[in-house]
Image: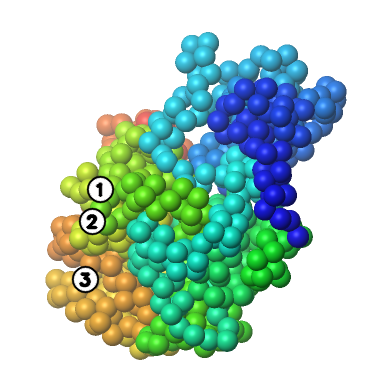
Amino acid sequence: MKSLEELRVIREKMQGTVEYRSEHESLADALASEHGKYRAHVLVCGGTGCTSSGSQKIRERLDEEIKKNGLEEEVCVIKTGCFGLCALGPIMIVYPEGAFYSMVKEEDIPEIVEEHLAKGNVVKRLLYDETVKGDEVLPLQETNFYKKQHRVALRNCGVISPEDIEEYIGTHGYEALGKVLTEMEPKDVIQTLLDSGLRGRGGAGFPTGMKWKFAAANEADQKYVCCNADEGDPGAFMDRSVLEGDPHVVLEAMAIAGYAIGASQGYIYVRAEYPIAVERLNIAIKQAREYGMLGEDIFGTGFKFDIELRLGAGAFVCGEETALMTSIEGNRGEPRPRPPFPALKGLFQKPTILNNVETLANIPQIILNGAEWFAAMGTEKSKGTKVFALGGKVNNTGLVEIPMGTTLREIVEEIGGGIPKGKKFKAAQTGGPSGGCIPAEKFDTPIDYDNLIAIGSMMGSGGLIVMDEDTCMVDIAKFFLEFTVDESCGKCTPCRIGTRRMLEILDKITKGQGTMEDLDRLEELAAHLKSNSLCALGQTAPNPVLSTLRYFKDEYIAHIVDKKCPAGVCKDLLQYKIDADKCKGCTLCARICPNEAIVGKVKEPHAINPDKCVKCGACMEKCRFGAIYKE
């Protein structure tokens, strides 16, 4: 077991190393650490996104080339978590220069090693273009993607090795746990969270300190702390990235929560589809036990707390707190009626608190820096920062952390780099299947809990999907309803039947078979679902439909009255045609048509037989003259 003094020694030993990477400290500072013997640090992204793009092979090739050039004693290669700019993977950064290499290929590695690592010549053609200004290499923090971000929950992602507890300690890791165990009473910890204004980052935004206060007030022979890492929203990967890049922050925060409410056991419920996160959590738990950060008599204070993993099978409903706890207990993941709430009767019918990964990732920093520090960020009712998984029709897809109150326009146009191919912004979906679509007219809305609810959406866990003018909003509503129907546990009739009836109506509309009365039925069904469903899955399932009806009703009417899809997405309402003035008669479209629907002679305009056309779009995609269009 490590004492507080031993923790301080480790931190001082490692601190220069991590500062060398994250803050561009001088080489002399880095040399003060054990790892400072290296004159260069190469950080390779080991998150899921970059791993799927081949970053593991990049790292292996780096090791080979470094060895071939005799640089093993001079260059240190570290596998880190996500840097955020997922669209540019595989990513690697070389310090002390802070050179940001993006879309790295195996064949690029010999040149980077020979020129940059051996000779000190940065290979500028392989750098992310925004980091190059003439002969100068700019720090990543000065690029558009990063300069408006403020990293709290993600502060260590892309900086430390997630598989080395000492690197986490080097960033003041486990100091917050030491502080609460030796300097604070449980009630003081809870009051700090209340004063900070931290609200749950998992969806509803309930005050974290209030949840802890309720659980602490209930006497029991056993209490539990649960972490919801079952992130299931389409397009969401915030929690996964924290677990992959900084797993110890979750363990530390859970131990703090255990002390605050009087619990001795914690569970992390993580979906099995996150193999890298699961592997790193297992490593982190093992290391934390070895160093005495988990287990008996932590820091010699008599406090004991341990954590176990439970793997989920990917059921979206298990993101709901009572369904999650039911699943941990070994039963089918279905929600339970509330009250009683988990703070009174939760896991195994004992007082339990449940927070998601991002919520927990903020807690050690709040303890170390104070409630006022955190409360100074954000808006009046939404304090701190929020992590978003930015995806869809945007140039810079990836992970961003911004202060609450940042506008949607800033996120999409400045951080996200705008819409590809010069297309116009049409809408953004926040909150996944539980959220809603924000139209262009609300583009300057400051993003926080209350503002999003006011415009018919919600924060959710932080998925943010951007849509351009080619998106059909009826089809988007149908997509999310399809997801909800598949993921409904079926326990309550309103959700089990109501979501299916709504989906059937949307399906009719996208096929051109809908009526205006169907729009009234959708709203009526939505009201029943919201007021009668057992859990939040059913209660929020109508949100994507209601928000698109609210802001894009003209598209529904076009599908019903005009039998047309304005965005050209719904196949049953489409017709592909050939512009005779543009067609050169090259016959390429006829040759690739899978159903022989295109006829015409060589060097003469062709035509499409609508009765045979399967509307696959292959002809339009391959036409070199832009002669094929859809309407």
Q: What number is the disc on residue 446? A: 1
Question: Residue 375, image x and y in percent?
Answer: 34, 51
Of residue 131 and residue 19, the one placed in the foreground of this image is: 19
Question: Residue 324, image x and y in percent?
Answer: 51, 77
Q: What number is the disc on residue 514? A: 3
Mark positioned earlier in the residue sequence (2 or 3): 2
Q: CA distance from mark 2 to mark 3?
A: 33 Å
Residue extending farthest to the top is 135
- Horizontal side of 389 relative to 31 (left or right) equals left
Please say if the residues under marks 3 and 1 sit with CB atoms less than 8 Å apart.
no
Residue 188 quadrant: bottom left
Q: CA distance from mark 2 to mark 1?
A: 7 Å
- Please give the name of the residue rendered at 40% of the width and 64% of the height, measured from the top-left corner: 191
- Position of the N terminus, as image quadrant, is bottom right
- Horizontal side of 582 relative to 55 (left or right) equals left
Mark positioned earlier in the residue sequence (3 or 1): 1
Q: CA distance from mark 3 to mark 1?
A: 36 Å
- Please give the name of the residue rendered at 37% of the width and 80% of the height, measured from the top-left corner: 535
Q: Would you call the spot at circle 2 few (<14 residues within 10 Å), some (14-19), or many (20 or more)? A: some
Query: Which amino acid, mark 2?
Result: Asn
Q: Would you call the spot at circle 1 few (<14 residues within 10 Å), some (14-19), or many (20 or more)? A: some
Residue under pointer 2: 451
Question: Residue 161, image x and y in percent?
Answer: 67, 44
Of residue 133 and residue 497, the one placed in the foreground of this image is: 133
Above or below residue 230? Residue 584 is above
The secondary structure type at the circle numbered 2 is helix
Please say if the residues under marks 2 and 1 sit with CB atoms less than 8 Å apart.
yes
Mark positioned earlier in the residue sequence (2 or 1): 1
Query: Which amino acid, mark 1?
Result: Pro
- Horizontal side of 531 relative to 63 (left or right) equals left
